[in-house]
Image (cartoon, rainbow, N blue to C red):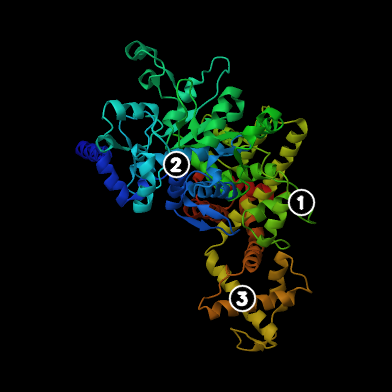
């Protein structure tokens, strides 16, 4: 093990040495002419980084960028807008002279998006992916592009001959070094490979506002170095200036401006100049060129106050706003909680199936807006958004539902509240497992301490908890009934084949051959109706439904695919409900008996074993589920 660690450390040092390339400008120019992407501007670098990870289109037609997959869930539309911003900016369109502002509710993922971009840049510039490597003038405090050394008079020729676009000028310190240390010999100026790092303040900066009275503008743009003024004589000498403000060190990369709208106006004036003119203005020097992406985030109240302030009109015009609402899909909300819990050191407490799902359902219900469509409840909308087709609504209806909303996802319960409440349930003394009922109880109890909600909202949230509880009751019954079915797939297949034989005879006006007596018999209407009634198929609707099934069978057959009980979603539901209905009494007797006989005890133990082996339960939550379902069936 020790030798293995030593080997890994040596490999790490070897990788670091490979990233420590140093040479002259002449050598760098050979590199950049072979691979022009190493000199790309900041917006283009970030866009290429995102695209390099790949993308695909989801079921609603939105682009899903894999770069964000591990951290951000259910925010395809905002992410698509962000990537569109970078795409336009990468073409050097005017949009690159705008600040990207993410606005949305607390805990919605705004800062996570920015953190992901920053971490991504760090990894991208360490990689050998095309365009990932970056180079800088070695002694430049702003890590500037070495091509800035080329005089303006030669840049046109360089672009036409080598295809290299050069934008920007040397910072005051590099100008001094070129003239005084290297005697104007551009080809001799040292260049190094640059790895972006927030920790080492290379290409990534973060500015956080504090008390406006005490916060100095030098945190943004650098300031006079008092220790060197005695040596150089004047404050306007670049050697007497520290180019170490967040805007200086973020040059070539990204600067996160945390809660930008809370800062003092004098800080915003600096951003005005930088965004529109790509220059930083400091007291002792002319404009200093900077190429960087500025991303900020804020909440809705701060933004509305900012928009209402006439003094801020100039800055408003230089902002690209992207709304980042809460996620509205249960499946993605579950992924958020799995990610957050996965980062903890909690390993000994088991989380029962559906625990995170019921917590997610509650959170999503709180964020949805009601619909004017007849029969569209919030619970139905939740299921539809999560990819589930309903009898009266289908996936194609989602766009229309979204268009009638004004602020959907901008209000409601934050993921932070949910994870805080789940955490409180997980760390209770002697707890080895938490189940969906524990989660709902923790969410309910936390509403009393939630300072950000009104009495009316509290009542509304309590109603949502009741609704989710009803949904879970049905899930729990189905889970136990499914576990009771020995060889469920085989039972479902047998019932399906029997149903299909009768449907085919009914639609073709033929008879069914009895497998036992070998007689020709009329289609079994009672059997077909007993299945169809499980999903509300009326007498008038039975013929179209049966014909639809035959068309689906024929369609699959033409493509060489077999039809099984999962091939038609509504028929699958009907088959399952029919099987479960037939087993209801058996489940009820077995789970509710206070003094079960040997046969009942055997069945109960078999169900517990199946829940553990096939459904992800532990002995504690499997037994609790069985007791809970028994109490439900006896109500």
Q: Residue furthest left?
A: 3
Across and down, in percent, residue 506 comes to 69, 83
Disc number placed over residue 521 in the picture, else none: none
Q: Is residue 629 above or below residue 143?
A: below
Q: Give residue 339's position: percent from left, percent from top.
A: 49, 42
Residue 371 badge: 1
Q: Secondary structure at mark 1?
A: loop
Q: State which mark lies toward you, 3 or 1.
A: 1
Q: Position of residue 239 (x, y in %)?
A: 35, 20
Asked if residue 172 is positioned above or below residue 606 in the image, the reply reads: above
Q: Which residue is mark 3?
A: 552
Label 2 neighbour load within 10 Å: few <14, some 14-19, many 20+ = many
Residue at 73% across / 62% down in the picture? Answer: 392
Location of residue 228 (image quadrant)? top left
Closer to the chain start, of discs 2 and 1, is: 2
109 vs 591, nearest the viewer: 109
> How far apart in space, not on screen, are marks 3 and 2 (Cα)?
52 Å
- Report which residue position mark 2 lands on: 42
**Figure check: 524 above or below 18:** below
Between 551 and 207, the one nearer to me in the picture? 207
Q: Mark 3 falls on what kind of element?
A: helix
């Amino acid at each position: 093990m020790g030798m293995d660690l030593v080997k890994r450390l040596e490999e790490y040092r070897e990788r670091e040495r490979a990233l420590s390339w140093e040479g002259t400008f002449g050598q760098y120019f050979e590199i950049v002419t072979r691979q022009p992407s190493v000199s790309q501007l900041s917006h283009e670098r970030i866009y290429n980084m995102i695209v390099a990870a790949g993308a695909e289109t989801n079921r609603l037609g939105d682009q899903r960028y894999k770069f964000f997959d591990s951290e951000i869930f259910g925010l395809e539309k905002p992410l698509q807008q962000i990537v569109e911003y970078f795409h336009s900016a990468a073409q050097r369109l005017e949009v690159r002279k705008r600040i990207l502002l993410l606005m949305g509710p607390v805990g919605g993922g705004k800062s996570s998006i920015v953190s992901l971009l920053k971490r991504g840049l760090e990894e991208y510039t360490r990689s050998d992916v095309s365009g990932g490597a970056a180079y800088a003038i070695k002694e430049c405090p702003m890590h500037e592009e070495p091509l800035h050394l080329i005089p303006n008079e030669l840049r046109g020729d360089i672009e036409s001959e080598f295809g290299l676009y050069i934008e920007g000028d040397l910072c005051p310190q590099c100008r001094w070094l070129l003239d005084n240390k290297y005697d104007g010999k551009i080809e001799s100026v040292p260049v190094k490979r640059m790895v972006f790092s927030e920790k080492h303040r290379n290409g990534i900066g973060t500015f956080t506002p504090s008390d406006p009275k005490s916060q100095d503008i030098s945190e943004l743009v650098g300031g006079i170095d008092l220790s060197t003024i005695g040596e150089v004589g004047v404050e306007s000498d670049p050697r007497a200036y520290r180019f170490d403000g967040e805007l200086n060190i973020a040059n070539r990369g990204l600067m996160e401006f945390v809660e930008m709208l809370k800062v003092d106006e004098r800080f915003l004036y600096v951003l005005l100049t930088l965004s529109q003119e790509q220059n930083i203005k400091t007291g002792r020097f002319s404009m200093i060129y900077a190429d960087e992406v500025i991303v900020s985030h804020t909440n809705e109240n701060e933004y509305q106050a900012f928009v209402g302030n006439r003094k801020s009109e100039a800055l408003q015009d230089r902002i690209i706003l992207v709304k980042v609402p809460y996620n509205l899909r249960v499946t993605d909300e579950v992924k958020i909680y799995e990610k957050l819990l996965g980062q903890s050191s909690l390993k000994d407490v088991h989380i029962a199936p559906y625990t995170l799902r019921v917590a997610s359902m509650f959170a999503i219900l709180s964020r949805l807006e009601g619909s004017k469509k007849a029969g569209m409840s919030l619970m139905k909308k939740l299921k539809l958004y999560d990819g589930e087709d309903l009898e009266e609504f289908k996936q194609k209806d989602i766009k229309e539902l979204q268009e009638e909303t004004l602020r959907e996802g901008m209000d409601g319960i934050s993921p932070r509240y949910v994870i805080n409440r789940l955490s409180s349930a997980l760390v209770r003394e002697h707890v080895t497992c938490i189940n969906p009922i524990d989660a709902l109880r923790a969410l309910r109890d936390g509403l009393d301490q939630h300072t950000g909600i009104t009495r009316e909202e509290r009542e509304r949230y309590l109603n949502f908890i009741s609704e989710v509880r009803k949904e879970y009751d049905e899930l729990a019954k189905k889970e136990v009934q499914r576990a009771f079915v020995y060889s469920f797939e085989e039972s479902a297949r047998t019932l399906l084949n029997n149903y299909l034989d009768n449907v085919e005879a009914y639609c073709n006006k033929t008879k069914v051959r009895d497998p036992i007596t070998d007689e020709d018999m009329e289609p079994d209407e009672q059997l077909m109706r007993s299945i169809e009634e499980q999903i509300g198929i009326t007498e008038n609707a039975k013929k179209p439904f049966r014909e639809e099934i035959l068309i689906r069978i024929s369609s699959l057959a033409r493509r060489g695919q077999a039809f099984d009980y999962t091939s038609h979603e509504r028929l699958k539901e009907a088959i399952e409900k029919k099987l479960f209905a037939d087993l209801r009494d058996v489940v009820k007797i077995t789970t509710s008996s206070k003094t079960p006989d040997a046969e009942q005890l055997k069945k109960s133990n078999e169900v517990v074993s199946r829940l553990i082996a096939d459904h992800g339960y532990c002995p504690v939550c499997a037994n609790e589920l069985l007791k809970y379902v028994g109490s439900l069936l006896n109500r």
